Amino acid sequence: MSNHTDDSRTLGHVIVIDDDASVRRSLCTMLKRAGYDVVLYDCADAFLCNPVISSPAVILLDMRMPGTTGVGLQSQLNTLAKNVPVIFVSGDSRPEEIIEAMKQGAVDFLLKPFTAQAMMEVIQRAMSVSEQAVVVADKNLQVSERLKRLTPREMEVCHWMVRGYSNQQIATIDGGASATIKLHRARVMDKMSAHTLPELIDMLIGLDIPLPQRAVA
């Protein structure tokens, strides 16, 4: 379960998943004192049963736990909470586990015992990554909603526009009239709330604009 929140009273949300009760208590006290909202789980399976994820968020994840391991949970987070940065904390990890964690996108690895300052610096850095991911996700959602306003014909014209094709070139490709393409182009710009072509291109970076099936002008 994931939800976006604009709670300005916290610096962000930290999800602590660790089977050591004393570690959970000390981390919770430290993080709340620093201004973070904290959610605690005693194992990866408990988190998977009730994953509470607000935004922006960072996950502090123990490597060794009963049941699902830290790396095992991390692989599931790639679909469950793809944009939530993961920081591993561990007192006993094999090199291959650390390598696998980093390959799967962990932002850092803290070896126990670690200092409060070291942890806070890592969390602040990871929270910045999460905040940026939230901004990008919100932007992409808005753009996706605007794209839904386009007719199949306008979507086709948009596909060629962002690839740098002129009205005449688009007309040559689809057999339409240049004046008609100009009209569709203007409608695309209006519906996408873009003032210039570079603005439209920037808006659609990272989003796939499919070429629709042959549309009727």
Image (tube, rainbow, N blue to C red):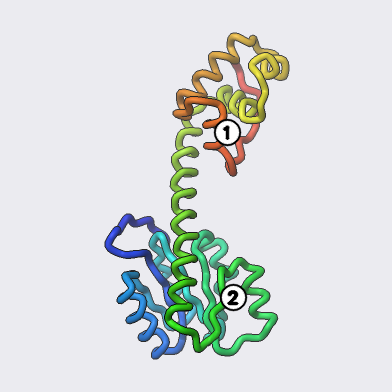
Residue 138 appears left or right of 197: left
Give coordinates of residue 71: x percent, y percent: 59, 76
Specify the amino acid type for callout 2.
Gly
Q: SS for tag 2?
A: helix
Residue ID for mark 2:
72
- Which is more N-terminal, label 2 or label 1? 2
Q: Estimate the x, y position of residue 55 in percent, counting from the top left.
A: 40, 59
Q: Quadrant of residue 162?
A: top right
Taking depth in this image into account, of 50 and 171 the one nearest to the observer is 171
* Amino acid of disc 1: Ile
Q: Quadrant of the C terminus?
A: top right
> Residue 146, percent across and down?
46, 33
Relative vertical location of residue 10 with respect to residue 152 in this rendering, above or below: below
When the figure is inspected, residue 167 is found, relative to residue 37, above or below; the finding is above
The structure residue drawn at horizontal position 62% and vertical position 26%, both measured from the top left corner, is: 161
Residue 46 visible somewhere in the drawing: no
Label 1, label 2: how far apart the Cα atoms are: 38 Å
52 is higher (above) or lower (below) than 213: below
Q: Which residue is mark 1?
A: 201
Q: Quadrant of the N terminus?
A: bottom left
Residue 123 seen in this snapshot = yes
In the image, what residue occupies the spot 61% across and 23% down?
157
Front one among 49 and 171: 171
Tell which residue pokes out farthest to the left in this image: 9
Residue that lies at the very extreme toward the front in this rendered image: 117
- Give the residue drawn at x 64%, y 16%: 167
Q: Residue at x 50, y 89 (%)?
A: 113
